[in-house]
Image: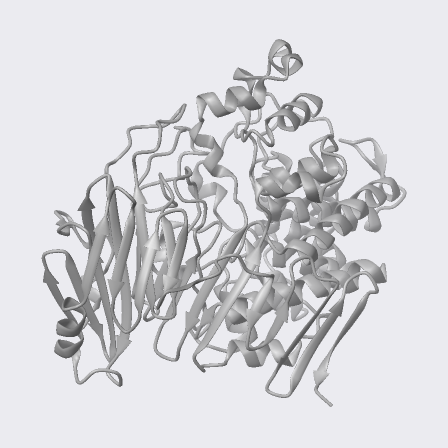
Amino acid sequence: MKPDMKIKMGPKSFSDIKLLDQGQQIDERPIHDLCEYIDLRLDCADFRMAAVLRCLYSYRYLLSDKTIALMEEAVLNFRYFMDEPGDDSMCFWSENHQILFASEAYLAGQLYPEKVFTNSSLSGKQLKTKAREHILRWLEYRFRYGFSEWHSNTYYEEDIGALCLLIDFAREEEIKIKSKMILDLILLDMAMHSWYGLFCAASGRCYEKQKKYPLHQDILDVSQAVWGFRHRDEYDYSRISSGYLLMKNYDLPRVIGAIGKDHDTVIIRDSMGLNLSEIREEFDDLKDFDTTGLFLWGMESFTNPESIEITLEMFESWKLHNNSFLKDLNIVNRKILKRSGLLPFMVRILNPVTQGIAIQRANTYTYKTKDYMLSTAQAHHPGAFGDQQHIWQATLSPEVTVFTTHPAASAFDDVDRNFSPGYWVGNGIQPYSVQHENVHISIYDLRKRIGFMEKDRKYYTHAWFPTDSFDEVVKEDRYLFGRLKDVYIMLAGRYPLENHKSNSSEWIQKGKVTYWICELGTAAQYSGFESFVQDLKSRDIQFNQQTKTLTYNGKHSYEVIYGKSFTVDKQTMDLEYPRLISPYGQIPRKPKEIRIEWKGNYLYINFDKMIREHGTCQ
């Protein structure tokens, strides 16, 4: 059985878990539904398992023997790792799934140490030991490198769900403390890159609805619980984020609360994840499945030259031939190809569009003011195929965002893989994008060599610019101007902008080599919207297609050379960042320790020494 997307994306928990937490008995049928889904081993079964384990640890005294038996059966019969027997299409490997499966295996083994888990034939004690190694490795990599699924307002919810389980129920102090540290870092990331509780930064994995409508962010309940911005009247306890709302053993650092409520004008520059070119220098054994292999799969790198060989070894060893996400690897899973050593070379020749699925390191620049937020992944692998990477976004309100993409079509037709890249999700071809304060510039070159499995390539880019949501809009040839209360925004293209016939929010710019310039301002900076329009229209823009060089002379003089450099007032901007440059703290790449300070509060973390301190600065 394969669920449709509506079932798959359905409730991961159940609303009445809140009543259980209050000591009340409930209608237990929703728990039965979760167990049935888990027993079928459908994709995202691990999302449901989080609620089942919380019920077994905290609420079993309120539940009937029948329901407890169903939950225990689901836990004891589940498949927790890819190397266990099984022929299903669960996704085990992405960053969020890795920690969910491992945390659930650990807590299941801890709960039933002497029982045999039927799928693996391991005792609970053995399963816990195995899971412990996976957990500690995952936590260490997040501390050292940040998140491969950087700034994701979808998948941070799943990471948080797993960490909350470990914080509340792991009996081992090291697991508990290090889980708190990584939860601190997720919430710190959200605090710095949120605008009035809306987590709207450039992102490694972001979907259409969350881009266009910030109030649909999966992480919204957590944001509201931490910072108190009231975007919803009630929390949704049927989400996996209910684990955060129910968590009992986490002490939120006050400094994180203060940063999330800061409305000063700030610039946040950070670096998350690893590039494929960095893997060789960061991992000792390039053939080890549990270190190098799972890190590559955590960044969704399967068919890149750097990953194809270990991918096929893992695929064969773990017998994943029928997994609906990975089944097309059977095409190249041939002994003659693997023995020849030609697979990386063949990948370079075929140029498969699936190379774009890999989420590589991002250097993100976020400019946040009390009036708006603008965020960009600087020079993020321009010209590469894309998938779910969200390169830039301006956020003006909970209802108004602006961004551009190169619309694409997924290489796959099945329900598990046909949603990205898409018309609004990710990019077909990544742009060369840069930002300085309130100005963003993207250059798109769509002439990249056609890739294996690539669908029909569109030779235009488009903008999401919801004209009906602005108070005032001016359209002139290649310019779009919008006013929302006292916030102004401009989009300028190389060629005339055309409104989509059936979607007033979509603006199309045709051409194989194009650019978009976005600039924001406020009424406090101009004598009025008309002054903003006239001032920005008068600015000189020059573009040389041969060198792909754009110059834009405004408040500053900007020069962008595609794939090479970005200068502001003739000063070359460094687009490679350490882990963090911000008013709240400076963190090097691969830190040994992290210290954050703001408004008289601090957070100090030393991962290896297991030191986690926070409070008021002395």
Location of the C terminus by quadrant is bottom right
| Residue extending farthest bottom | 618
Find residue 189 and report its horizontal and vertical position in percent: 56, 65
Question: Residue at coordinates 36% horizontally, 60% vertically from top-left?
Answer: 393
Residue 215 in sight here: no
Question: Residue at coordinates 39% horizontally, 58% vertically from top-left?
Answer: 566
Could you say which is closer to the camera, residue 322 or residue 333? 333
| Residue extending farthest left | 476
Question: Residue at coordinates 52% horizontally, 71% vertically from top-left?
Answer: 192
Name the colouring of the figure: one colour
Q: Quadrant of residue 89?
A: top right
Q: Quadrant of residue 598?
A: bottom right
Find residue 299 and report its horizontal and vertical position in percent: 58, 43
Question: Residue at coordinates 58% horizontally, 37% vertically from top-left?
Answer: 91
Find residue 3 and report its horizontal and vertical position in percent: 48, 35
Residue 220 in sight here: yes
| Residue extending farthest top | 336
287 above or below 7?
A: above
| Residue extending farthest right | 114
Could you say which is closer to the camera, residue 185 or residue 588? 588
346 above or below 257?
A: above
Relative placement, left or right, of 71 versus 517 is right
Could you say which is closer to the camera, residue 219 or residue 331? 331
Find residue 66 and report its horizontal and vertical position in percent: 71, 47
Task: Report the number of numbered marks.
Answer: 0
Q: Quadrant of residue 230?
A: bottom left
